[in-house]
Image (tube, rainbow, N blue to C red):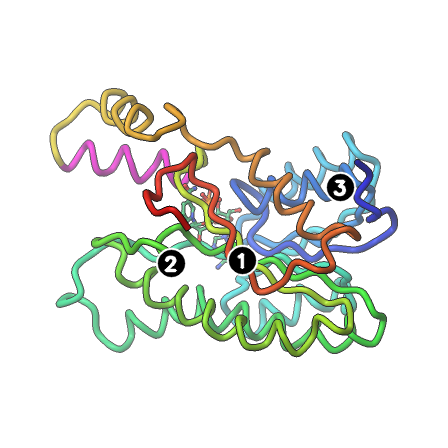
Amino acid sequence: MKLGLEGRHALVCASSRGLGRACAVSLAGEGVSLTLVARGRDALEETAAHIRRTSGVQVHAVVADITTAVGREAALAAHPAPDILVTNAGGPKPGHFRDWNRETWMAALDANMLAPIEMIRATIDGMARRRFGRIVNITSAAVKAPIDILGLSNGARSGLTGFVAGLARQYVAHNVTINNLLPGPFETDRLLETAHQWAKDQGRDPDEVLARRRAANPAGRFGLPHEFGDACAFLCSAQAGFITAQNLLLDGGSYPGTF
Ligand SMILES: NC(=O)c1ccc[n+]([C@@H]2O[C@H](COP(=O)([O-])OP(=O)(O)OC[C@H]3O[C@@H](n4cnc5c(N)ncnc54)[C@H](OP(=O)(O)O)[C@@H]3O)[C@@H](O)[C@H]2O)c1
């Protein structure tokens, strides 16, 4: 299936590694030019070079922190009128709610709720005027089934989800859709680092911990980033104009509910 995206431009936030990178790679494979954003220059330049080499599309690489106003301005300056916006940022650290104060909460809200909303605010009206727009927010399976130690993520991402559920209905008639992708366990740096840290804290062997987590998933494995990227590219496709305000869980069947 051709996704009808040739010549479009996507701004993919937090995209030097992991799920953001995978979305960028899949979109580039469909002929979409890109603005990539991350804080660290080396991985970002490496990803940009890899995508240029393998797909031939134009790639702007912007070193910026997407959770700050200055960072968002820099990202938008590279290409102010994207057809596709993928919002993403690092996830909050695990912890216990009694240890979190207003500052901790505001940092989580900035990263996982307000930054995506600001990026949407800056781009959605142009998309509506041009009668094509696709917005995909990378959230988390924690929106559907909260994870006890990730209370900051559960809360901030649910706030974003509630907000876009209302907004999406106001824009779909202009061929602008907003959907959320909810990753379960995907084999990225974040997952591996978190698992290694947890194993170290518990005095356990990281390989054994990872093997148990893989076995506990109905699929018997973690998700692969390219599977996530391809789901994102489909939601951005010309064909997906009737899919909006959805929360698509990609978790190998971990969530036990019927719906
Ligand atoms: N992987 C999973 O299994 C999983 C499951 C559920 C939810 N998630 C969520 O999905 C998101 C992506 O996870 P991932 O596994 O792909 O993480 P990852 O492998 O750690 O990659 C994170 C990417 O985001 C960039 N980034 C982080 N904070 C940024 C910021 N403030 N501004 C700009 N770029 C930023 C990082 O580059 P720099 O550090 O250089 O900025 C990197 O490119 C996270 O919010 C995570 O919590 C992941």
The residues bearing labels 1 and 2 have C-alpha atoms spaced at a distance of 10 Å
- Which disc, if any, is residue 143? 2
Q: Residues within 10 Å of mark 2 (few under 14, many from 20)?
A: many
Query: Residue lying furthest right in this view?
Result: 7
Q: Main secondary structure of the magenta part?
A: helix
Name which residue type carries label 3: Ala
Q: Between 3 and 23, which is closer to the camera in this rendering?
A: 3
Judging depth in this view, the residue of 219 and 34 nearest the camera is 219
**Res 70 quadrant in image:** bottom right
Taking 231 as reference, is 146 above or below it?
A: below
Q: The N terminus is located in which quarter?
A: top right
Tell me the SS state at disc 3: helix
The one nearer the camera, 226 or 51, is 226
Residue depicted at x 42% and y 51%: 259
Label 1 amino acid?
Answer: Asn
Is the Cβ of the residue at disc 1 closer than 8 Å to that at disc 2? yes
Q: Nearer the viewer, mark 1 or mark 3?
A: 1
Magenta span includes 168: no
How far is the residue under mark 2 from the one under mark 3?
28 Å
In the image: residue 168, left or right of residue 58:
left
Q: Label 1 belongs to which residue?
A: 180
Check disc 3 and report the residue beneath it.
28
Q: Closer to the camera, 231 or 120?
A: 231
Q: In the image, which residues are magenta?
A: 189-201
Instruction: State which mark lies toward you, 2 or 3.
Output: 2
Q: Where residue 219 appears, x then y in whole percent?
A: 40, 27
